[in-house]
Amino acid sequence: MLKVGFSEFDITPAVGKLIPGGFEPCHTSEPARGKLLATAAAFDLNGNSLILVSVDHLSFHTNTADRIRRRISDATGVPFDRILVAATHTHTGGQTDYQLWLCPPDLEIASMTEEGAVTAGISAFGNLSEAAIGIGAGEENRYSFCRDIYMTDGSIKMNPNRAHPELMIEPVDTPDYAVNVMRIDSAEGEVRGFIVNYANHPDCHAKNKKSFSADFPGALRRGLKRVYGEDIFVLFFNGTAGDINCIDWMRSTSDSYYGGTKNAPEAIGAGLTSTVVEINANIKATESAPEITAISKNITLARRYKTDADLKWAQEIAKDMASHNAKDRAFATEYLEDDSDVSPEIEFEIHTVRLGDWAIVGLPSEIFTDIGRRIKTASPFKNTLIFELANGTHGYISTKTLHESTAYESTVSKVNACTAKDSADRIVAAALRQLEELKNV
């Protein structure tokens, strides 16, 4: 019979530390809005194992994610390619172990986050007990909006200025509203935990980033615990949210989100909780002997570099950095760095996992909606989920339309948009080949 184990570990930094989720870091000055957690679920069927780890963190450097997976593997014996670790992408989490725009690394905080992820993964595997799983799906279309807008001058702008709404034409894409839910029950039929997959940017505190917060995934977790018991576990995995956030730019209804509240994370978390509860009510069958397989392969993507024009622009900005905004200072600072020793190729991991009736595609970047939609539509599986920021990050993977624009997500950078224009097509093709292979394992 299937065995499942859970664990969660508190990774909340102390007040006074930096929050790196913007161009310019903010010092925390208020107590955390709920805990930042690393939460893990381990699955085992007759020695065939899988460990999923969800971490309230902005993003992991790929090397860090690899190290977390390797350490869990060494401690548990679960193969490296059967371990997936993903950041929820909260913009009010702890510092990373790499320079992120104008926010320096903090190795102490990053180490605490890593230890939390490793401990959660190992502990979950050590807590295995008989269980069964069931899945359901629904939609949540109240809180997610495409943040890239076609403008009347022919450009595409991300989060355009509301001062001139007449200049906006329409969003570039439509969000993926899917909410996929897996419920894990004990052998006695009691709810032990949920895995939730939904696409939206956890950057909903607007400019009020004075404290650490897991954003709406944390509010969702607290909401489900209130409904089903404080001892349940909730893992959140973000979908294709690279071009999606909680602001309805076209209707300009709120500075926070369409629902019109200044506490968007709690409102979205509460609404998403209700949606998961509704989905759960229709999860009838549970499976005690699910298929557990995984395939992980790398593809090679070409790297983008700054141009001579970029360097010239940066040199002009550098003449008076203080007079420019944080975004320009961040890009200019990077452009002035020597990148001659940076590899022209990027090894990009595509991690496909089959867990019962779910096929999961883990991608180490912020993925645009259209890319995920293309994978889902052509997938040989009925239920295909995309987990973005899985096993690391290589910045944004945007569509060709955005790649050819001057929008923020397509502006060349080591941490922002570092892959070539054909990357999306190559990722989609490779993911579909791998899903076909997974189907036939």
Image (cartoon, rainbow, N blue to C red):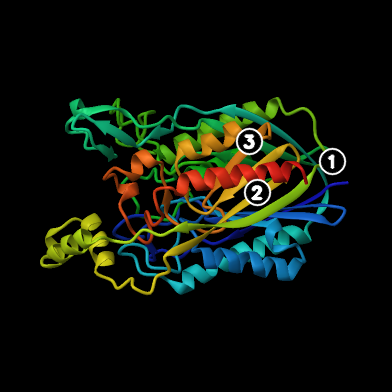
Q: Secondary structure at mark 3?
A: loop
Q: Quadrant of residue 381?
A: top right
Q: Are marks 2 and 3 in contact (CB under 8 Å)?
A: no
Mark 2 residue type: Thr
Which numbered tag is attached to residue 288? 1
Instruction: Determine if residue 221 is in view.
Output: no
Residue 360: image x %, image y %? 64, 44
Residue 440 at x, y percent in the picture: 76, 43
Cα distance, mark 2 to mark 1?
Answer: 21 Å
Quarter-of-image position of residue 255:
top left
Q: Tag 1's secondary structure?
A: loop
Query: What amino acid type should be assigned to the residue bearing mark 1?
Result: Ser
Amino acid, disc 3: Ser
Q: Which residue in the protein does label 2 denote?
A: 352
Q: Position of residue 145 (x, y in %)?
A: 40, 32
Between 30 and 274, the one nearer to me in the picture = 274
